[in-house]
């Protein structure tokens, strides 16, 4: 079944992106610690920190783009293998506009999240500088260090969650969506219906049959209902 081959790939690539993002966060923590000890936070220390963070962001964005190219190429190849195994002709879509746009939009979204993380550290450094010079020394520790050890940012629904969790969810959902929509494109080109396949054969939606966009259950409704960031299900051609 397709889920048993695809889900491990998605999990592995999500883990690689997560490790890369954690390295970026750890680098910001290191920069923050160095800058806050710099000459008692005198001068334009916040501006210098921002410049250093921007350099880290540029490097991280290049690495992220490389990782995602590797991930979607792997998933595209797996989709081809799974389609051809069923005796259906596979039409490559990796260089088509919708799929290139999907990858670009996701990388930009993660880049924006990383910019928010960097801004969180920058704001904290500014607060430390303000406390050091304008407030009584007894109040200098009011800023929560724990919020920097595990920085939180707002998601699209306005919820403040761990940055590492948000990036994990977004990454896994994007890779799951990419694979599924490669299969959906094949179904559309071959006028075939689709079926849900889970790693857990006892899942209540295992074997659900649906169309690409017709009446009754269709991909858009199934995607909304079943394919959340932690889903262990994928779509298959119903042949």
Image (spheres, rainbow, N blue to C red):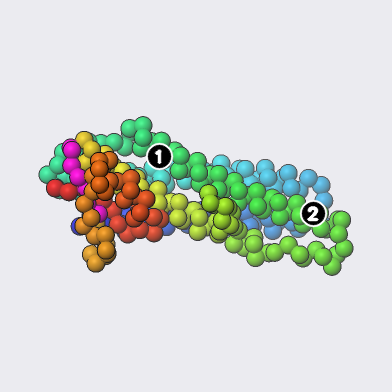
Question: Residue at the spot x=27%, y=63% of the render?
Answer: 204
Give x and y (percent) for residue 180: 30, 47
- Quadrant location, the N terminus: bottom left
Measured Cα–Cα span from mark 2 to mark 1: 41 Å
Which label number is shown at residue 128?
none
Element type at marker 2? Answer: helix
Badge 2 local density, few (<14 within 10 Å), some, or many (20+)? many
Which label number is shown at residue 102?
1
Question: Is residue 164 in view?
Answer: yes
Seen from the viewer's position, the closer of residues 197 and 69 is 197
Q: Height in image: 145 above or below 23?
A: below
- Residue that protrudes farthest toward the front in the picture: 215
Indicate left or right for 43 with 121 as reference.
right
Nearest to N terminus: mark 2 or mark 1: 1
Give x and y (percent) for residue 229: 40, 55
Q: Give the magenta-colored segment's residue range.
A: 190-196
């Amino acid at each position: 079944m397709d889920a048993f081959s695809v889900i491990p790939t998605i999990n592995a690539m999500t883990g690689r992106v997560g490790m890369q993002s954690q390295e970026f966060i750890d680098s910001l923590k290191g920069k923050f610690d160095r800058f806050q000890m710099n000459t008692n936070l005198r001068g334009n220390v916040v501006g210098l920190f921002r410049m250093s963070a921007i350099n880290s962001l540029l490097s991280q964005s290049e690495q992220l783009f490389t990782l995602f190219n590797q991930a979607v190429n792997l998933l595209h190849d797996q989709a081809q293998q799974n389609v051809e195994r069923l005796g259906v002709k596979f039409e490559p879509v990796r260089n088509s506009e919708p799929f290139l746009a999907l990858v670009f939009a996701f990388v930009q979204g993660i880049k924006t999240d990383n910019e928010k993380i960097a801004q969180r550290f920058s704001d904290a450094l500014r607060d430390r500088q303000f406390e050091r010079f304008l407030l009584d020394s007894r109040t200098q520790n009011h800023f929560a260090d724990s919020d920097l050890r595990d920085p939180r940012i707002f998601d699209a629904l306005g919820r403040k969650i761990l940055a590492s969790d948000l990036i994990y969810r977004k990454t896994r959902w994007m890779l799951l969506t990419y694979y599924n929509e490669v299969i959906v494109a094949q179904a559309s080109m071959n006028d075939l219906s689709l079926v849900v396949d889970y790693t857990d054969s006892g899942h209540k939606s295992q074997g659900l049959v649906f169309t690409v966009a017709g009446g009754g259950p269709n991909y858009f409704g199934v995607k909304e209902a079943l394919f959340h960031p932690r889903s262990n299900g994928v779509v298959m051609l119903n042949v």
